[in-house]
Image: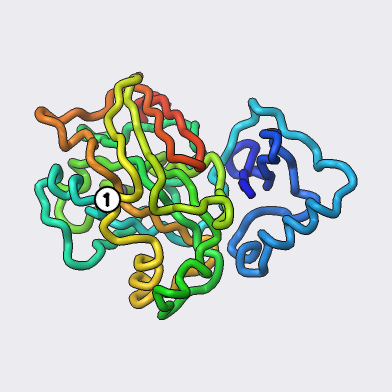
Amino acid sequence: MKLIRFGNPGQEKPGIIAEDGTRRDVSAFIPDYTGDFFENDGIARLSDWLASQETAPPEVAQAVRLGPPVARIGKIICIGLNYVDHAAEAGMDLPAEPVLFFKATSALCGPNDGLLLPRGGEKTDWEVELAFVIGRTARYVNEADAMDYVAGFCLHNDYSERAFQLEHCGQWVKGKSCDTFAPLGPWLATRDEIANHDRLGMWLTVNGAKKQDSSTANMAFKVPFLVSYISRFMTLMPGDVVTTGTPPGVGMGFKPPQFLQAGDVVELGIDGLGSQRQVVRAADSI
Ligand code: ZN
């Protein structure tokens, strides 16, 4: 299944994208897709409920805004330098173990809401990434069992202000957490929907020019290992999001570097996970 949340920011309702491509409102079944929904076998119960309906749930117009496909996300854990070539373009070695960092959940937004360049930012950059959503409470999980803890997958743009990230001392979190720096969606594809999450094509363009063009096959640390590895250091809760790192082609990797300006248009996609489009605006303009 493909799970969506639709409506104005903060007022989203749960829905699905049906086999025929129509969007359907399932708020009669569940008020929202929270961690409780995933923990309590909500995906299977929603599937059963849909199969039991004599008529399809109400249709949602294609023009209606989409929000992030999961509600009240507890934490966003990011993996750094997880593609060999990206580590090289960043001038860093591929780490011996996954690099973990956090992104503030207040950065979350819908897939097409647009990017706000933060005040004082000079080096705002893009990162197309495969994200996955935790479906069950996970602590000390074996790699062999890890996929049982994954509810599904989403497209994510891990926006990054490189000056905030690298030139202001301390951890990367400062450069990863500005408002609108975590567009997620358009949908959450449930695990059964994505047979080969480790072989998905992924791309990103700026003003129509291809910048990133790779595959999740090039990830150094794969999803099952990441679930197991992170669960050694913290409990992963249902609804938590893990974003798995970006391939080469980010702005800071170009010579000279290329960073985003107001008016730019960023588009990105991953096989089976849809696409996003963000128009760049200056935060001072709102
Ligand atoms: Zn990233």
Residue 99 x/y as whole percent = 24, 62
Image quadrant assignment for residue 16: top right
* Left or right placement of residue 22 versus residue 164 in this view: right
Tally of marks: 1
* Left or right placement of residue 166 versus residue 226 in this view: left
On-image quarter of the C terminus: top left
Residue drawn at point x = 49 percent, y = 37 percent: 111
Q: Which of 55 and 278 is in front in this view?
A: 55
* Left or right placement of residue 68 versus residue 231 in this view: right
Q: Which of 252 and 122 is in front in this view?
A: 252
Residue 160 x/y as whole percent = 28, 42
Q: Nearer the viewer, residue 114 or 152?
A: 152
* Residue positioned most to the right: 54
Residue 186 against residue 70 in the figure, above or below: above
* Residue positioned most to the bottom: 140
Residue drawn at point x = 26 percent, y = 35 percent: 124
Residue 274 x/y as whole percent = 51, 37
Residue drawn at point x = 17 percent, y = 66 percent: 96
Residue drawn at point x = 80 percent, y = 50 percent: 28
Crowding at label 1, few (<14), some or many (≥20) Cα neighbours within 10 Å?
Answer: many
Q: Would you name the residue on which mark 1 appears? A: 174
Residue 54 x/y as whole percent = 90, 46
Give the residue type that dot 1 points to: Lys
SS assignment at label 1: helix
Q: Does the residue labelled 1 lie within 8 Å of ligand 1?
A: no
